[in-house]
Amino acid sequence: MNSFLRILRVEILKLRRTLALVLAGVTPLVVVVLQCFLVLHMKEKSLAPGANSWEAVSTAILFWAVLMLPLFVTLITSLLGQMEHNGDQWKSLFAQPVRRGGVYAAKILVATGLVLAAHLVLACGIFLAGAVLHLAFPRTAAGPIPWAQVSLTAGKAFLASWFVIAVQAFIGLRWKSFVVAASAGIVATITSVLMINSDRWSRFFPWSLPAIAASKAGTAPGYAVALGIAGGLLAALLGGRLFVRRDVI
Amino acid sequence: MNGSVNIIETRGLVRRFGALTAVDRIDLDVPAGCIYGFLGPNGAGKTTTIRLLLGLIRPDAGEVRLFGKPLRGFRRESLARTGSLVEQPSLHPHLTGRENLEIVRILRRRPRKSVDKALAVVRLEKEADRLVGTYSLGMRQRLGLAVAGLGDPELLILDEPTNGLDPAGIREIRLLIRSLPGELGMTVFLSSHLLSEVEQVASHAGIVDRGRLVFQGKMADLAEMKGPGLEIRARPRDKARLLLAEAGYESVERDDGALLVADADEAAAAALARRLIEAGIDVSHLALRRATLEDVFLKMTGNGGERSSS
């Protein structure tokens, strides 16, 4: 097995008994359930005769992308960092015959994988919730189920989140204190929410990109996806370079 | 392997932290197949040196060579042949003992059965599937040693390996370490702040003090430096030390307050006794004695205060 794959295998092994997988499953479902409550609250309109229950629930992707996704990324990346900071794991990890850059890349890949898993859960949750609502309110239309639209929107939010993943991963891996990573993530997320309506600023802000990508307006989503991917790759490379050069004390 | 090859070799190794020079021009020579005791008081630079040997930190000057190759450029290759335990073992508490070993086994590309073997060597087979978070300090230390020794590396670098162990555990580890070079042809580099811990197992020794290597050679050579010495209890102590220094005898202060003077013979003892008393110093005890290795160590590191008394 190639050395990078071995590092990756170890990173996945280390996730055992952590909250990472639970978070990836629970956080998107919380958003879907909340969206269901919202739909039920406004059922006269959203579940009117002939309405599409799946479309009503699919707004969950936007809520997810605006608020829950950046917070989820913050939690996941800090978890991956804390795992090594606690008990000074770095020194024993880097005393093994591994490339430090490989470890860094594996951490980012694992974080990205968990974010992808969360998006899959999100999409499945929307299809399921839409079906349940349709069965509960037979007056709504039986279809068409917006498979492509939901998958595409969730996919765009995922790709646009690479930038945030790379930045938060660097913070989480670089600083020993959980407070640093958590504050950065929370402050940036709130900032993003506050300026979501300002096109001028939010379009360059990594934490806003998933929300822009998930919105339906004009050409902005494509741009947010492109910047998310490019920024993510660049931030990962830069972060990796800074990380590799550090003393392991 | 024979003694002519140095498994660890450093030349002019320097590492500074701000104004502090933690490692100051250290030249280590660790021959193949030896047990090398790396000694010094706490804070002398032992751990920093070990971090340099493992490439965890970079030197400000000088070079590290492991297995005859510069660490710069051959880091991964050299580390694949080196097992290590630096300070407290780094273990994942949310994983079992076996899973912690499995991590190292995968990274080091060792066969599956090496995990069982490592567990057996430190006698943790029964606890292997328990979470490390529930382990006692001693069990963690043993698992740390199992991690270091997994897959029988050619070089074992252990930083204070008996920390946190009870006397039985210390004895066990000592026996284990002593058996390694013979059985597996391993070279062991072992740091400690206690001479007593190393003198029984090590064939070679290096003594470091304030970042400088003050002795390096065979353990037997160190033992030969045990000359006759003088043990003095006097009050006030500072004045006594000053007077001894004026008379040309360096003294060190032991934990219990006794002053030790190396290389003092009978005539010197009598002369010093007279001088102390004539200067109005109360002398309650003055005895000629054969110096122990501990005295040699103390003298070299010039510091009795930092030493733990076990």
Image (tube, coloured by chain):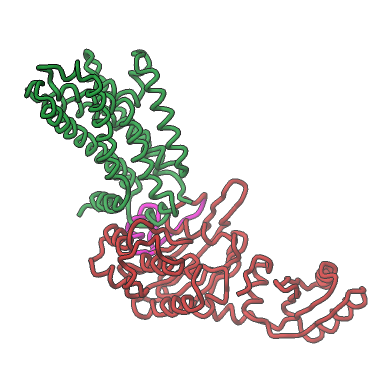
Q: Which residues are magenta?
A: B61-83
Residue B83, picture quadrant: bottom left
Query: Percent x, y for residue A26?
Result: 27, 39
Rendered position, A158 above or below B223: above
Which image quarter holds the C terminus of chain B? Answer: bottom right
Residue B296, picture quadrant: bottom right
Query: Percent x, y for residue A126?
Result: 18, 30
Residue A245, picture quadrant: top left
Task: Work out whether residue A75 or residue A138 is closer to the camera in this orientation and state it.
Answer: A138
Q: Which color is chain B depicted in?
A: red
Query: Can the viewer see residue B153 in this picture?
Result: no
Residue B73 is a magenta residue: yes
Question: Is B266 on the left or on the right of B138, as rendered?
Answer: right
- x 70%, y 71%: residue: B255
Question: Is A217 on the left or on the right of B92, as rendered?
Answer: left
- x 38%, y 77%: residue: B180
Task: Work out whether residue A216 or residue B101 is closer to the camera in this orientation and state it.
Answer: A216
Count of numbered labels shown in the rendering: 0
Task: Work out whether residue B8 or residue A23 is closer to the camera in this orientation and state it.
Answer: A23
Which image quarter holds the N terminus of chain B? Answer: bottom left
Query: Can the viewer see residue B194 in this picture?
Result: yes
Query: Percent x, y for residue A4?
Result: 25, 49
Rendered position, B10 above or below A155: below
Q: Which color is chain A depicted in?
A: green
Residue A88 is a magenta residue: no
Query: Percent x, y for residue B86?
Result: 46, 61
Question: Is B303 on the left or on the right of A169, as rendered?
Answer: right
